[in-house]
Structures are given as C-alpha cells and as structure tokens.
Amino acid sequence: MKVAILGSSGGNLFNLGGRDPEKLLGEILVQCQSAGIEVAAVQFIAAQESMDVAKGKTLASLYSWNIAEQTFVKGQQNNLSTINDQAKSADEAIAALISNKEVDGIIIMSGDPEGTNNAAITAAAKFKLPIVGTGGTSMAMISTKGANVIATSGTTGTTNRTRAVSFVTSLSKQWNIKYMPVLGHQGNNGQGSSISVWKRINFKGIMQASLPGFIAMAIVLALSKIPALAVMSDVFNVIIGALPILIAVIAAKQVSELDEVSIVAGVIAGILSTEGGIIGGMIGGILAGIFVQWLFTKCVQWRFPMTTVNIVAGGVSGLVAGLLMYFLVSPIALQLGEWVKILINAAIDFNPILAGILAGLLIWPAILAGVYHAAILPIVLLEMETTGNSFLGAVDMVGLVMVSAGITLANIISPRDKGEAAVATPGFLINMGFGTFVEAAYPFMFSNKIVFAGAIIASGIGGGLVGLFAIRGTAYVPSFAAPFLSDNPLGFAIAMIVSLLIAFSVTIVANRTTRAK
C-alpha cells in the first residue's frame, strides 16, 4: 500500500513538532516502513513561523519526496506566497497519482483543502481513499467534501511520534496490515527500534541516565557545608526528595519511548512513589512506561482522538502506576534499599580498612567483567540517596579514576614508545577533568601484566585508605573538586594521591623494564 503525506507546519502544530519538519516527517516515514507502507508522494509546506501569524512574506520551504532514494527533499527557501504556488503544482501532480491509482491513502496535517491541497483531497474523496490526519478545522472541511476520513484529531497534546503511530495504526487496521509501532527513532529517514516494551526495561540504563541528578545533589551538599551557604542544606533536602521522581521519569521514557506522554506519566508516578525511595521511583516509572504504551495502543485502536489518547496514556498511566506504588509497593521498595545500606554499613563497621581493601581489589575485576554499572553503580546511588555521597563512590574515584590517571600519566612521561604518549594524554586529561573514562588505562594494562597487577594493588591500597579515613565521596566529577564533595576532604585527597602515585610508579618501572629488554 502507498500513501501521500500532505499538509503544512501549521498553527498549533508548529509548536508541537511542526517547527522541525524533518523530524516530524521522519517519524511518519519510520512508522510507515514498519507497517510495510510505501510513501508515494510528499507535499509539505514548512514555514518559519506559525501559520496563525504567517504572512505572504514569511519564509518557507516545500518538502517533496525522492522515490528513487526514498528520502525527503527540502526545496529552496522562499516567501510563503511563492511556496504556496509551488505547492499547488505539487498538489496537481499528487491528484494525478491518485487518479492513476498510485496512491492508496492520505496522511494530512494542518492541510488546506480549499487551497494548496484542494486537488489531492478532491481526488481522494472521489476514489474514497482512507484519510487520516490532524488539524480540527482542516479535517472538518475535508470531511465535508465527502472524503473517507477514518481517523481525525486536533493537535493539542500530541507529539510527532504519537501522531505518526496513530496515523499508521489507523491505516494498518483499515488495510488489515500487521503493524508494530517503532519507538526510539529521532530524525529524518532514520531507522527506529521495534523492541518490545519488556526488553526495554534496563535497570543499568536507568541508573546511568540518573547519575547527573545525584552529582548535582553531591555538589549542593558540599556547598551547604560552607557557613555562608548553610541555606543550601534546604536545597539538598529538596533534591533528595525529588530523586525518585527523576528516576521515574527516566524509567518511564526509556520503557515507553513516547516522548512527552511518557514524561508526564513518569512525573505523576514518581510523585506518588517518593515514599519508596529511588527503588520505588524506578519501579513506579517502569510501571508507568508499560501502562503508557499499552493504553496508548489500545486508545489508538479504539480510534480515540489523539488529544484524548495522550491524556489517557499519560495521565491515567501515571496515576495507576503511582497509586499502586503509593498503597502497595513503596514500603517494600524502601525496605529493599534500606537492606542494601545496612549491609554496606555493617561491613564498614566490622572492619572499615578491610572493607575498603576488598572493595578496591574487586572494583577493577568488576568493571572489566562488565558488572560495574549493573551492580556497583546502583549501590553507589542508593548510598548517595541518604547521605549525598558514598563509600563505594569514594572507592570508585580512588581505585579506578586515580589509578587510570596514574597509568596514563606514566605513559605520557615515560612511554614504552613515543606513540603511546599520544594515546595516553586524552585519557589522563579526561580522568582528571571529568572523573571518568577509566577505560583509558585498558591498552596499557592488557599489554603488560606488571601494569595490570600494579593497578589492582594501587586500587586495593587506595580502598584501604578510604576505609581508614572513613571517607564517603563520589566519582564522575573533576578530580580536583572530588575531595570537597566528600565528608573528609583531606583524607580523600591523600587516598587519591597515593593511588595515583602507586599506579604511576609501577607503570614507570614496567615501561622502563620493557624498553631495557
């Protein structure tokens, strides 16, 4: 089956995706491809401002379709009156395609059935082609022409993705075509992902995406310790309370990938999940994301107007997920988080130095085995939820970041060969400047067993110092700032420097030994 895509960037539509025509059209293309529907023609007027205020001199462009390359083509920019004349010519050409039965359906957004889309709509009405679209006034006018409008809606509350999914769902149902909505696509002529909602539940991905919020909290905590900024302690408490909402929003968006609709659902679910801590926020967000996609699909199949679809999918999904969390799940989720914290504190209370050494010795094998982000990072965030910093977060900075910095610094100063200095320099600068990118040390660790052993030893000693000084801190911040975000700046600085120097010294010796051989 083949469709023609018609319309303009519109009035209200302009503020809901029309200002970015390539993204808008790209979403429709991806959904059509998922259903096996071909695009036969495009006539889309993209203005530089809303059609509600646009005038003849407003700059605009006309988008068409290149059948051979299967891509949208943006015409030369000109004033709107000239573009309208060009659009009328395209309108006649599309009407001819319809008359020749080369078009089976119409997708139209903020169209002009009495002007630039008159010929195509008249032909579509004559041949009873199914028409789907948005734009309350224009769709009403299209219906009065006797057209076969099978799905219509206003644009309020819609997004590029929800509109595209709605269009293709309605056409697929009309033509009895199997269709799986494609989510995760952004852009023109790209490929999306039709992974099921269950496979998009990724705890590691949710935690990683939430990390900036925890770093912001650590910064606020550090500022609150300055006497003149004591008022920041109130800000710190606000951020702690908002963390479950942050995680819920990220979880809902990643699971459903329905843009603003899933964000709204995540916010509602997150607000009602705050009593469950960050675990509660994650569970609430995941539930909201699942409900969003299910309700969205059902409402589209029931041919609800798109505005109603978004209200139901976003509002009701968030409310149902949030109420489940509020009355049933949050107390359990909170207790799970507390058990993790109790276990860590018990290990530290038993022997903080031993706990630090073990954490330091194991953290490199953990990241090399790929379990760091799945196991250690969530624990770091759970610790930070209460205190604003973390024991394992301090071990991360000392045992991974500083060790990697020491190894790369040694290869800058005394490399095995000159080429390695160029490889090591960016890694050292990123580790010191951003508190991350420990992978920079991998080439040197994997190519020399002494360097690898030195990294483990330096990390273990650094972890022991973290335990000795009872440090709670964080990585993922500039190294020079990390001590000030901890509860023991001097002790943290000592532990960081010692780890860096040990890794640096071992690597220097290893490199010189290799050169001597």
Image: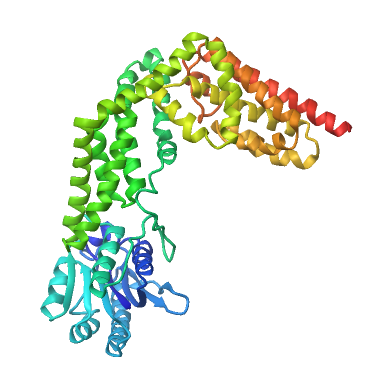
| Residue sitting at x 21%, y 62% | 301
**Residue under the image location 13 percent in, 75 percent down:** 141
Total marks shown come to 0
- Quarter of the image where the C terminus is located: top right
Rendered location of residue 110, percent (x, y): 22, 68
Observer-nearest of 347 and 467: 347
Q: Does 463 sit left or right of 142 as displayed?
A: right
Splitting the image into 4 quarters, where does residue 66 fall? bottom left
Residue 491 shows in the view: no
In the picture, residue 73 is in which quadrant?
A: bottom left
Q: Residue 432, position in %: x, y?
A: 59, 30
- Which is more toward the observer, 147 or 295? 295
Is residue 361 shown above or below 208?
above
Furthest residue toward left: 144
- Judge left or right: residue 321 versus residue 374: left
The colour scheme of the drawn protein is rainbow
Q: Seen from this angle, which residue lies furthest right?
A: 517
Quarter occupied by residue 332 = top left
Give residue 359's position: percent from left, percent from top: 55, 21
Q: Position of residue 35 (x, y in %)?
A: 34, 69
For the N terminus, the image quarter is: bottom left
The residue that appears at 77% across and 42% down in the rendered structure is 419
Q: Nearer the viewer, residue 79 or 139?
A: 139
Using residue 164 as the reference point, say whether residue 391 is left or right of it: right
9 up-or-down from 365: above or below: below
Answer above or below: position of 358 versus 278.
above
* Residue 512 in view in this figure: yes
